[in-house]
C-alpha cells in the first residue's frame, strides 16, 4: 500500500517528465515525452505512468499503485479543489509545494 508521503515523493520525481500547471482550479501535468507527449494527466495518473505501470483512468492508476480508496478520493479532491475544508486543502497545499506550482 502506498502512503500519502510515498505518493508525494513519487510525484516529486515527475517534475522532469511533466509540465505542471494550475488550470482553473485543477492541477494538471502535461507529458513532455513518449507516445502520450502533450496529453494532460492528473497527479495520480502521472505517477502511475512515470512508474512504468501504464496509462489508464484514475481508479486504475490507484489500483496499480496500491493506493487506498480513501487516499485516492483525497488526492482527486485535492487536485480538483472540490472542497476548501480539512484534508483536501492540506493535501492540495502539499501537492502544489512538491510540484512548485
Image (spheres, rainbow, N blue to C red):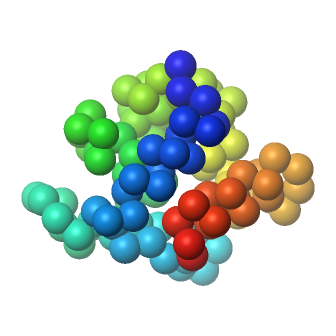
Q: Position of residue 85 (x, y in %)?
A: 88, 56
Q: Residue at x 55, y 36 (%)?
A: 6
Q: Position of residue 67 (x, y in %)?
A: 53, 28
Q: Residue at x 47, y 23 (%)?
A: 66
Find residue 22 and report its image quarter: bottom right
Q: Residue at x 63, y 37 (%)?
A: 4
Q: Is residue 45 visible?
A: no
Q: Nearer the viewer, residue 63 or 7?
A: 7
Asked whether, in this view, residue 74 is left or right of residue 31, the answer is right
Please identify the residue farthest to the bottom as the structure is shown: 24
Q: Nearer the viewer, residue 98 or 69?
A: 98
Q: Position of residue 5 (x, y in %)?
A: 62, 38
The C terminus: image quadrant: bottom right
Q: How many marks?
A: 0
Asked whether, in this view, residue 54 is left or right of residue 26, the answer is left
Please identify the residue farthest to the right as the structure is shown: 85
Q: Residue at x 60, y 80 (%)?
A: 24
Q: Is residue 4 visible?
A: yes
Q: Position of residue 12 (x, y in %)?
A: 47, 55
Image: 49 above or below 23: above
Please identify the residue farthest to the top as the structure is shown: 1
Image: 83 above or below 1: below
Find residue 58 and report its image quarter: top left
Amino acid at each position: 500500500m502506498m502512503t500519502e508521503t510515498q505518493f508525494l515523493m513519487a510525484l516529486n520525481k515527475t517534475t522532469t517528465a511533466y509540465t505542471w500547471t494550475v488550470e482553473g482550479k485543477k492541477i494538471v501535468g502535461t507529458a513532455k515525452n513518449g507516445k502520450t507527449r502533450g496529453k494532460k494527466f492528473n497527479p495520480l495518473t502521472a505517477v502511475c505512468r512515470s512508474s512504468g505501470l501504464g496509462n489508464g483512468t484514475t481508479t486504475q492508476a490507484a489500483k496499480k499503485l496500491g493506493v487506498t480508496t480513501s487516499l485516492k478520493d483525497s488526492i482527486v479532491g485535492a487536485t480538483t479543489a472540490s472542497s476548501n475544508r480539512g484534508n483536501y486543502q492540506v493535501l492540495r497545499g502539499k501537492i502544489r509545494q512538491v510540484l512548485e506550482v
